[in-house]
Amino acid sequence: MSSDTPVKTEEAAPNSAAAKGGWKCPLSDAHIHREDVRKVWKECQEESFWYRALPLSIGSMAVTGGLIFNGVWKKSIRFGYFPKLAVAGLLGFAVGKASYFGTCRSKFQ
């Protein structure tokens, strides 16, 4: 079946993205300013440390120290009070960092 009529192909509209060089992924946009992203990331890390992680860490360590001092929790015979205070501090820090996640996400939008 040979015919001399040309086959019609779909042409892109003159103002579409396909006519201007193809479709581009919004995640790999070249116009994102890396300095701005780095600045927001650093600001987010500093705020999460000073406003959430450090206060929760100190607070949990203070509560744990109070519980050990009042005799509710016993200190370790071998290591003393240090392991319980260290675990309380690390957990407070982790919970503080995790609790600031939503705030950081909203800053990037």
Image: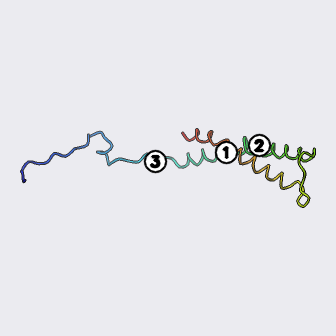
Crowding at dot 3, Cα within 10 Å, few <14 / some 14-19 / many 20+, comes out as few
Q: Which residue is mark 1?
A: 98
Circle 1 or circle 3, nearest the eye: 1
Q: Which residue is mark 3?
A: 27
Tell me the number on the disc at residue 83. none
CA gap, disc 2 to disc 1? 11 Å
* Residue 105, x across and y down, in percent: 58, 41
Q: Residue at x 75, y 49 (%)?
A: 91
Most foreground residue, 53 or 66: 66
Amino acid, disc 3: Leu
Q: Secondary structure at mark 3?
A: helix
Crowding at dot 2, Cα within 10 Å, few <14 / some 14-19 / many 20+, comes out as many
Q: Secondary structure at mark 1?
A: helix
* Residue 38, x across and y down, in percent: 58, 49
Q: Which residue is mark 2?
A: 56
Most foreground residue, 96 or 40: 96
Q: Residue at x 72, y 42 (%)?
A: 52
Q: Residue at x 66, y 47 (%)?
A: 45
